[in-house]
Amino acid sequence: GAVVSQHPSWVICKSGTSVKIECRSLDFQATTMFWYRQFPKQSLMLMATSNEGSKATYEQGVEKDKFLINHASLTLSTLTVTSAHPEDSSFYICSARDRARGASYEQYFGPGTRLTVT
Amino acid sequence: AQTVTQSQPEMSVQEAETVTLSCTYDTSENNYYLFWYKQPPSRQMILVIRQEAYKQQNATENRFSVNFQKAAKSFSLKISDSQLGDTAMYFCAFMTFWGDKIIFGKGTRLHILP
């Protein structure tokens, strides 16, 4: 149980284009999903928190117009990197909190998406 | 604001040995949660162990145990009888009682040597 998937696992896009990353909770409903960014050999940095049916809350320093987050259902959140540039190349990880288990439980992490912008 | 500090960027131990990874944190809250996550080369985050701050008893999961010192704000992870599969990046993490976000330390890269 508690499986989170991400699609795609790896994407290469050209500079200036937009790319969408999906995060799905497969066997539970997630009222809250989190998006992290991880540079090579570094820690996870929280980018934003998305709650189903409402606007995402972005961490300080994260451009909300560049990293569009949509959480349209209890099992799906999407991150769209708009007008991508090489510096956006990174590993993006999502996590989800099980609605049934409440806020006190750990987040379940997806396998991550490697984004390479050429 | 909460912070998590891992002072050991990298460690190596021989297989079957015991190793302890250090973690300190800072918070003004009284109730919270602490975690150790493992990130192997696949980069999938795996929860190793979890500790509730209101519990005095240290959490254990098979070969993994923690030494939680609330007053000192210390949360170390002990891996007993280390195995080659334990080779990974280990992150110490803090979560508020309300679960609004998880804050990760910078990680410790652990190498288990055959």
Image (spheres, coloured by chain):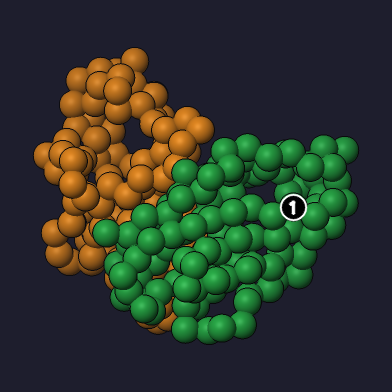
Expressed as whole percent of the image width and height from the top left, the position of residue B108 reads 58, 43
Protein chain holding label 1: B
Expressed as whole percent of the image width and height from the top left, the position of residue B66 reads 64, 67
> How would you rate the neighbour count of disc 1 (Cα within 10 Å): few for under 14, some for 14-19, many for 20 or more?
many
Q: Which of B18 and A111 is in front in this view?
A: B18
Q: Nearer the viewer, residue A26 or A44?
A: A44
> According to the colouring, which chain is orange?
A
Relative to A12, residue A32 above or below? below
Side (left or right) of A69 relative to B98: left
Side (left or right) of B78 relative to B106: right
Q: What residue type is labelled 1?
A: Val
Please, what secondary structure does the residue beneath circle 1 have?
Answer: strand
User: Residue A84 falls in which quadrant of the image?
Assistant: top left
Relative to A109, residue B13 above or below? above
Q: Which of B3 and A115 is in front in this view?
A: B3
Q: Mark 1 points at which residue?
A: B19
Q: Is any atom of residue A96 visible in this view? A: no
Q: Residue at x 76, y 70 (%)?
A: B62
Relative to B75, residue B90 above or below? above
Q: Which residue, as the protein is rendered here, is positioned at the far top?
A: A118
Give the tally of numbered discs: 1
> According to the colouring, which chain is green?
B
On the rendered image, what quadrant is the N terminus of chain A found in? Answer: bottom right
Q: Is any atom of residue B9 visible in this view? A: yes
Expressed as whole percent of the image width and height from the top left, the position of residue A93 reads 41, 46
Q: Which residue is drawn at 43% across and 59% down?
A: B25
Q: Residue at x 79, y 42 (%)?
A: B13
On the rendered image, what quadrant is the C terminus of chain A found in? Answer: top left
Q: Which residue is drawn at 27% across and 59% down?
A: B1
